[in-house]
Image (cartoon, helix red, strand yellow):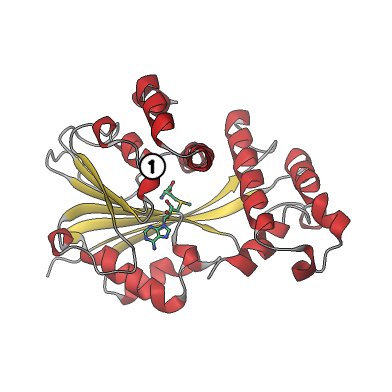
Amino acid sequence: MAITTALDEKVQSLRERYILPHNVEEIERMQNQHEWVKGCADGLIKAPLDMTRKDLRVLDAATADGYWIQDAKSIMPAGTEFVGFDIAPDLFPPTQTLGPKVTLSVQNLIEPFSPAWKNAFDLVHERFVISLFKEDEIAQVLHNLLSCVKPGGWVQFVEPDFGTCVSRPKDKTSAFQMIHQLTGHVMADNMASTKLAGRLEDAGWVNIGVSVRDMMAGNAHPDPALGERGRKNMLAILNYFQSVTSPETFGLSEKEWLTLPERFSQDMDQHETAIRHYIVWAQKPVV
Ligand SMILES: C[S@@+](CC[C@H](N)C(=O)[O-])C[C@H]1O[C@@H](n2cnc3c(N)ncnc32)[C@H](O)[C@@H]1O
């Protein structure tokens, strides 16, 4: 994929020397997920940003290793400046590998942001993090992110809806559907994505757009490579959620719990298994 070429091997090996093994695994998972979601969504940016401008500023929230930024660089006009932040700086690649016009910094989504970020970005992008926050925290997260957008600028969220079953046939994909229960138990709100557009409307944002994509994981995907990426990602996600929960919580026997990954995988082999994702964008009104 284009991003692999962009992040040349030297950068990759530098990264691997600087980061801890558990981070290497998580970074690989997130990069695979990035390619799956990008492929299923037909691209990275849906907000109708004016791409003819040469002075754009983009903020990527919860950027992890900055992979989205490195890929977005290839489609944004030359001269675009990128800022990324995360609470986990151990995921950041070494500064010297970021390239010009990219900076990463440590910032918690629910703590006050730097005044320098107020009304400072043409696009604020956020992906795969909102479900971690409780209702009152989401209000703070949104307040923080929206405050960073310039009047007339755009915000874009890309978030899964882990609560809605879109796999088929419904009665034959029960192992895969365990992901809805697991995420429902662990995440603060596994359907937070479904409420984003309403929240933006309530905040007075305009030109709100929503694209709902059921992203297939496994053999049913028309593009086998993307289906494989989806399968790998969903198995990694299942593995994580099983590691922080137990069979009793879901009324499963020890055997059912231990065989879940295999049955989950079989569902992805034999049926149409998918996770719904919301891509939501909106424009800050010019007052
Ligand atoms: C699933 S990863 C998504 C990474 C990236 N946005 C992507 O789409 O690949 C979630 C990221 O959110 C970060 N994160 C979690 N809680 C956060 C918080 N309160 N403030 C900032 N970042 C946070 C994690 O460190 C992690 O890098």
Instruction: Please provide percent x and percent y for residue 231.
Output: 65, 40
Give the left or right position of residue 189, taking residue 11 as reference: right
Ligand 1 in which quarter:
bottom left
Within-10-Å neighbours for mark 1: few <14, some 14–19, many 20+? many
Residue annotated with mark 1: 65
Query: Can residue 164 be seen at all in this image of the molecule?
Result: no
Give the left or right position of residue 187, taking residue 72 as reference: right
Query: Can residue 31 be seen at all in this image of the molecule?
Result: yes
Quadrant (top left/top right/bottom left/bottom right) for the N terminus: top left
Instruction: Please provide percent x and percent y for residue 286.
Output: 14, 65
Instruction: Please provide percent x and percent y for residue 113.
Output: 23, 65
Instruction: Please provide percent x and percent y for residue 253.
Output: 87, 62
Q: Residue at x 27, y 67 (%)?
A: 144
**Residue 168 or residue 129, whichever sits in front:** 129
Q: Residue at x 79, y 51 (%)?
A: 260
Q: In the structure shown, which secondary structural element does the residue marked by tag 1 occupy?
A: loop
**Residue 83 or residue 49, whichever sits in front:** 83
Outermost residue to the bottom: 136
Quadrant (top left/top right/bottom left/bottom right) for the C terminus: bottom left
Give the left or right position of residue 159, taking residue 146 as reference: right
Q: Amino acid at mark 1?
A: Asp
Position of residue 235 relative to residue 73, above or below, is below
Give the left or right position of residue 181, taking residue 203 as reference: right
Number of disc labels: 1
Position of residue 232 relative to residue 260, above or below, is above
Q: Residue at x 76, y 57 (%)?
A: 170
Ligand 1 near label 1 (Cβ, under 8 Å)? yes
